[in-house]
Image (cartoon, rainbow, N blue to C red):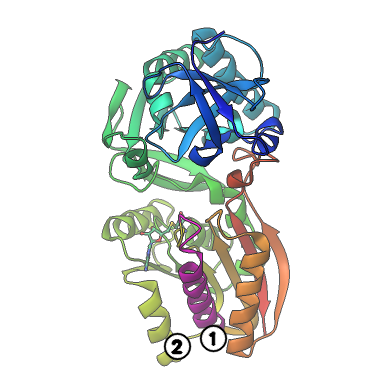
Amino acid sequence: MLPNALYIKKGFEKSIYDGHPWIYKNAINRIRGKFTPGDLVEIKDWRGKFLGIGYANPASYITARVLTREQESIDEGFWHKRLKRALDFRRNIGVNTLDAYRLVFSEADFLPGLIIDKFGDYIVMQVLTLGMERVKDTIVKILIDLLPVKGIYQKNDATVRAFEGLTLEDSIIFGEVPEKVVIEENDVKFCVNIAGGQKTGHFLDQRCNRILLKGVAQGANVLDAFCYTGGFGLNAAKFGAKSVLGVDVSEEAIRTASHNAKMNEVDEICEYEVANVFDRLRELEKEGQQFDVVVLDPPAFTKSKKAVEGALRGYKEINLRAMKIVKEGCFLLTCSCSHHISWDLFESVIFEAAKDARKTLRIIARGGQPPDHPILLGFDESLYLKCLLLEVS
Ligand code: SAH
């Protein structure tokens, strides 16, 4: 038994009992013992019935995260078991043979606050909570034990760390990590800028959705809006697109996208521009430009519930503009990566945009997260990526 415990208010225990790993500040009835932020605590219902063990941080609105619903020791053996389970799972679903994949997807891999991506022989980890920060060195030690890895980089620059009272840090934590690593995904080569890129360096979560372009890219003029390092457009080029125009606001991303186009020997048909997509879509419409395929893969316009309305306006605006520059009977691939925007909400905002643009839409495919980003039922927060391939007429 641990010396510290959090007792949950009556009525708030159900979701935790059913597997939701977050304990919000307002769900806590009382605290037994004194703990330092980051310490392990037992989680009990209001009567004292054991619900699980987690780590706590009173500085955060998510005051505790459940690690286990069993009575067990949270020691090196525990972390080893959890990481091995994440690895075995990737083996069981056949993604471990890929050059690059997500190895640990936080709560959905029963390792709350930890993201690990593998790029060839290198690993990039993001530690998002104080509880995880405390065991970071143990995690690194186990990773080296479990995998042939040349280097591990900690990309701890996510602003959510501030909610946990953690500073931002960005450094090599084991071995040697080059500034750039080349990976292959869907037969396309990408240069991943580990230290200077966004998030862990490459958006692995769109791997399967990029393939949705296969049926529609042949001979197409493609606009890849919010292209980052060229993910969708380069796949389209491989699938036989006639031309690709990539747009992103980040100069660094556009530099890498152009480099990636060269590396894949499709630079003759790919053009990249640094621009704000909101402005560029309006300009393209004014210029009377039309595309066979438009891809919209914006960043999460909202990271909080409060900002949903503003985000919906953003989604509506870009989708409406995009629909106007898609040729009659051609295609729009549109995405949302905010978990605050549900599938229903996403589809309804796309429909609203279509009505305003006087367009008719048919859904050809719905895409979500690839298998290395599993969705934990009972934990809605693990479902965030939605992708629609639409015919626009
Ligand atoms: N489609 C990419 C991932 C996109 S991530 C892929 O397949 O890899 C979102 C991108 O949107 C980031 O590269 C970011 O720099 C860019 N971005 C954010 N706001 C933008 C804006 N207003 N205009 C253009 N690009 C923007």
Secondary structure of the residue carrying tag 1 is helix
Rendering coords of residue 92 (x, y %): 70, 27
Residue of label 2: 285
Indicate left or right for 28 with 347 as reference.
left
Q: CB of mark 1 within 8 Å of CB of mark 2? A: yes
Q: Residue at x 46, y 26 (%)?
A: 56
Tell me which label, 1 or 2, sits earlier in the chain.
2
386, above or below 183, in the image = below
Q: Amino acid type of disc 1?
A: Lys
384, above or below 23, in the image = below
Q: Residue at x 64, y 20 (%)?
A: 48
The chief SS type of the magenta part is: helix
In the image, 241 versus 312, the foreground residue is 312
Magenta residues, as a range?
303-325
**Residue 313 drawn in magenta:** yes
Neighbor class of circle 2 (other Cα within 10 Å; few <14, some 14-19, many 20+) is some
In the image, 274 versus 64, the foreground residue is 64
Residue of label 1: 324
- Quadrant assignment for ligand 1: bottom left
Rendering coords of residue 296 (x, y %): 51, 67
147, above or below 204, in the image = above
Indicate left or right for 364 with 63 as reference.
right
**Does any portion of residue 122 appear in the rendered image?**
yes
Secondary structure of the residue carrying tag 2 is helix
